[in-house]
Each structure stands twice: as C-alpha cells, then as structure tokens.
Image: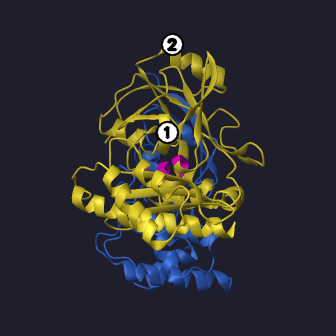
C-alpha cells in the first residue's frame, strides 16, 4: 500500500536531529532501518507529519570494544553487521546469535539492533541477551547525554523510557567478568523467521569454587515488557549449576512469567517453555562460564 | 507536495527521477522506471518478491524509501547478468544463477523468481559453496506459493558449482 504523505528529514548531525525532534514533538517519528516503521506507516498505525532518518549522521553504525568500557553498538549497526562482526563474535557471541535469530536475511540487511530495542516489542529477539548482559542505552538530547539501564528502559509494549526529545544513539554492554557465560534461547512456531513465542537470555558468572556467583535471566514474550526471573536468579546464587538446581530454577522462572494466550502460543505453553528454555539457557551459560 | 529530484544508481547507470519522499524504491523501480522484474508481493517485508541488492546487500525494496536509496548502488534482476543487454533484455545473456533456475525447473509461476535469484546472489557472494541447510537459510526471506522449494534449492546448488568452475 502507498505510504501516507510525510515530510522527510535527514539531519547530518546529532544536534540538528535533536533540534528537529524537539521542534516537531508529537508530530515526528524516527527511523533507522525502517523495517518496522515503514510497515507501521503502511498500515496507518502511525501517521506522523515528519519522518526523520538517522542514516545521514556519520558514526552511528560503529561496533567497538574496549577492555575497560566493554562493547558499544551504534544505533545504525545493522542486525547483519552484529551477526557477522568479528568484535561481537569474539566478545559477545550470543548477541550475534540473537541477531541471527531475528526475522529474515533481507530484514537483517536493513534493520538495526537498536530499532529492535526501541520498537519495544516484548518478544524482540535482541532484548533478553542484552538485559542479561546488563546493557544500557545511551540517550542524547539538547539537555545532554544519559545512560538508561535496559532493566528500566521498557515501560510497556511499544513504550520506552526515552523522553520525546531524546534519541537512542548507542547500546553499551559492560565487559563480562571472568568466568562468565551467556546464552540465548528461543522457541517459535516455525523455528526460523517468525516472532518468538518465548525467548530467554541468561548470564552466569561462576566463583572460584564453581558455584554461581551471579545469575541474570531475562524472559521475553511472557509479559508486557521483558521480565527478569528474579526468584530463579536468587535461588541459584551461591549454588552449583547442577541439573537439580537448574530444574528448580526453571520452575521458579516459570512462576515469575505472566504470559497471555495469543496467536503465537497459549499461556500454558509459554509457562512450560519458560521452564524448559531457562534451564537450557542456564546450562549453556554455566558451561561457557566454566570454560571462560 | 513538491517532488525531489534524486539520482539513483541502478544496474550501473545513474538515473535522475523526481519522487515524493513517501515513495518506496519498489514503486519507483516499477511505476516510474518500468523495471518490473522486481515484484511487489506482501508490501511488509515478509515474502521477498521485491528483493533487490543495495550495495551488494539483499533488501526489501518495498520497505526502502527511494530517497534513501540515493548514493547507493542498486542492482535489480534486470542488471544481475554482467553482460545484460538493456536494449534487448529478452535476448540478453543470463547470469549463471538465472541459467540454473531454468535448467533445474526452479520456475513455476515465476512471481517469486526474481527475489529468489537476488537472495541467491547475496548468499553465493558470501557463501560460495553453501550446504543445503545454508541455501535454505539463505532463502528464509523468500516465499514461493507454488511451493517449488526443492528445485529452487537444487538450482542454487547447481549455480554454486557453475560459478566455482568459472562458467
């Protein structure tokens, strides 16, 4: 369907972009890859007077690593770039797995990880792993720059903590502690291409005795925002990642999930899958942690 | 609203075209430039019939704004063969992937074929000797409603062999 009419804005630096964002507040939408925004325009789900692309702003597609600062993924880094980036594959390979699990080849060649986050779908493929890894969003506005923890970023389906005059310009992921492993697990009807019925990101850091020193579990598509499995995290702290403990952690994660039934899965199935996938994610993450 | 004059580099040629900013690359290719080899299927980036290459990357032309394609190299099915004769496309030499699709019976109604071939091109550029699983994953963004997938997979494997032998 032909898109609704809009004025197109293509600022060439962040200050200009933020000025436009402030000036046209309430009447402007921002696009990066456009794979969600163009569909929403086409369906008339949004009817902005202005559409602003970030693509003319140089430097926003960087992917960089620093031993102290960790990983930075710019707002325009494509899903495909994250999928094959040697930096990501070396330092955060689960982010590449999550990017690879997103949609189709063409969508990954156009869409960005940041777009997947800012769209704030509870089932987004790239969110659980980043939450597990304690990522934050760098928000830029005329008032300055701030970092928002992903734990605080999602307010509801399609709603984020970004203010109307703020642009999300980068994702920051801290360098993992030694003996840390991460996993991403997903289940969907077709297993490829389609949207997750449930997805889980888990991070495990082991202590010197091989027990779980630190555990973070993020569950997608089982609530209005990605949810932490806090009971499971607390249960595992200080315990070995034994099969019996992971099974109990799985049950506790399912208890913390609050899914609904929809076209993709029933709430009963989702609860069961949280139990299964969180066990798998914890087993894989603790296995990686032991080898790291 | 006023149209904007942009220059699109399509199949190696710079083409000036006046477009509204809300026009997709698919609309401009098909309706303005009459390059109708690129199809429009779902219009939401699910079916892959509209796939073109933008700087060598396979993208959905239905989700690409024409104004944002300026400054990039666009390749459509019409320009896939390096020896394509744009004056007489009907008798123009084909790319090995196109030849394999014909020889292996990978075309039924033909609607998905241009998109399938552009996806195959992106796959083989990055994975010249793909396994069957890699071919199927490479086609994950392209739907064939005649469901002739097996022959399409065969054709791409055949094209990979041809290209490896320099045919």
Residue at numbered disc 1? A151
- Residue B35 visible here: no
On the image, which quarter does residue B11 sit in?
A: bottom right
Given residues A264 and A176, the one toward you in this image is: A176
Given residues A258 and A207, the one toward you in this image is A207
Q: Answer yes or no: is residue A250 visible.
A: yes
Foreground disc of the pair 2, 1: 1
Q: Secondary structure at mark 2?
A: helix
Bounds of the magenta segment? A124-131
Q: Residue at x 58, y 16 (%)?
A: A19
**Would residue B44 be counted in the magenta stretch?**
no
Q: Residue at x 37, y 28 (%)?
A: A5
Q: Chain of mark 2?
A: A
Colour of chain B in the image: blue
Mark 2 to mark 1 CA distance (whole Å): 30 Å
User: Residue shown at 31%/72% (left/top)?
Assistant: B109
Position of residue B55 relative to residue A49, above or below, is below
Report which colour depicts chain A: yellow
Image quadrant holding the N terminus of chain A, namely top left
Q: Position of residue A235 (x, y in %)?
A: 45, 55
x%, y% of residue B64?
Answer: 48, 44
Horizontal and vertical percent position of residue B59: 51, 54
Mark 2 lies on residue: A23
The residue most toward the right is A67
Mark 2, Cα crowd under 10 Å, few <14 / some 14-19 / many 20+, is few
The image quarter containing residue B164 is bottom right
Is A125 colored magenta in this rendering? yes
């Amino acid at each position: 369907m032909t898109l609704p009419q809009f004025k197109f804005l293509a600022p060439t630096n962040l200050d200009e972009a933020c000025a436009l964002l402030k000036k046209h507040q309430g009447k402007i939408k921002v696009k990066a890859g456009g794979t969600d925004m163009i569909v929403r325009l086409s369906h008339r789900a949004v009817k902005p007077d202005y559409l602003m692309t970030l693509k003319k702003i140089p430097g926003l597609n960087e992917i960089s690593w620093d031993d102290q600062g960790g990983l930075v993924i710019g707002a325009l880094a494509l899903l495909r770039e994250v999928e094959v980036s040697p930096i990501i594959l070396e330092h955060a390979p689960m982010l590449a797995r999550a990017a690879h699990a997103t949609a189709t080849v063409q969508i990954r060649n156009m869409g960005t990880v940041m777009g997947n986050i800012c769209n704030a779908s509870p089932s987004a493929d790239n969110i659980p792993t980043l939450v597990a890894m304690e990522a934050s969003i760098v928000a830029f506005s005329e008032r300055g720059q701030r970092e928002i923890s992903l734990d605080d970023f999602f307010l509801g389906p399609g709603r984020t903590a970004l203010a109307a005059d703020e642009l999300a310009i980068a994702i920051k992921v801290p360098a993992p502690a030694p003996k840390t492993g991460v996993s991403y697990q997903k289940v969907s009807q077709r297993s490829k291409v389609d949207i997750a019925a449930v997805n889980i990101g888990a991070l495990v850091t082991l202590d010197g005795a091989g027990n779980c020193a630190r555990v973070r579990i993020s569950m997608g598509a089982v609530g209005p925002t990605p949810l932490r499995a806090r009971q499971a995290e607390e249960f595992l702290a200080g315990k070995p990642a034994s099969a019996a403990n992971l099974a109990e952690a799985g049950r506790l994660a399912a208890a913390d999930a609050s899914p609904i039934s929809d076209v993709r899965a029933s709430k009963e199935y989702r609860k069961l899958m949280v139990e299964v996938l969180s066990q798998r994610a914890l087993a894989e993450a603790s296995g990686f942690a032991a080898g790291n | 609203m006023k149209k904007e004059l942009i220059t699109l580099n399509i199949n190696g040629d710079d083409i000036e075209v006046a477009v509204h900013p809300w026009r997709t690359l698919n609309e401009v290719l098909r309706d303005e430039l009459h390059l109708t080899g690129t199809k429009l299927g779902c219009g939401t980036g699910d079916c892959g019939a509209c796939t073109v290459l933008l700087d060598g990357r396979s993208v959905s032309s239905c989700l690409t704004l024409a104004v944002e394609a300026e400054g990039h190299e666009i390749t459509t099915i019409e320009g896939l063969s390096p020896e394509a004769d744009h004056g007489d496309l009907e008798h123009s030499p084909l790319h090995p992937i196109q030849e394999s699709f014909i020889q292996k019976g990978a075309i039924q109604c033909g609607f998905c074929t241009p998109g399938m071939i552009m996806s195959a091109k992106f796959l083989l550029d990055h994975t010249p000797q793909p396994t069957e699983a890699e071919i199927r994953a490479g086609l994950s963004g392209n739907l064939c409603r005649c469901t002739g997938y097996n022959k399409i997979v065969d054709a791409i494997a055949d094209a990979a062999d041809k290209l490896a032998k320099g045919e």
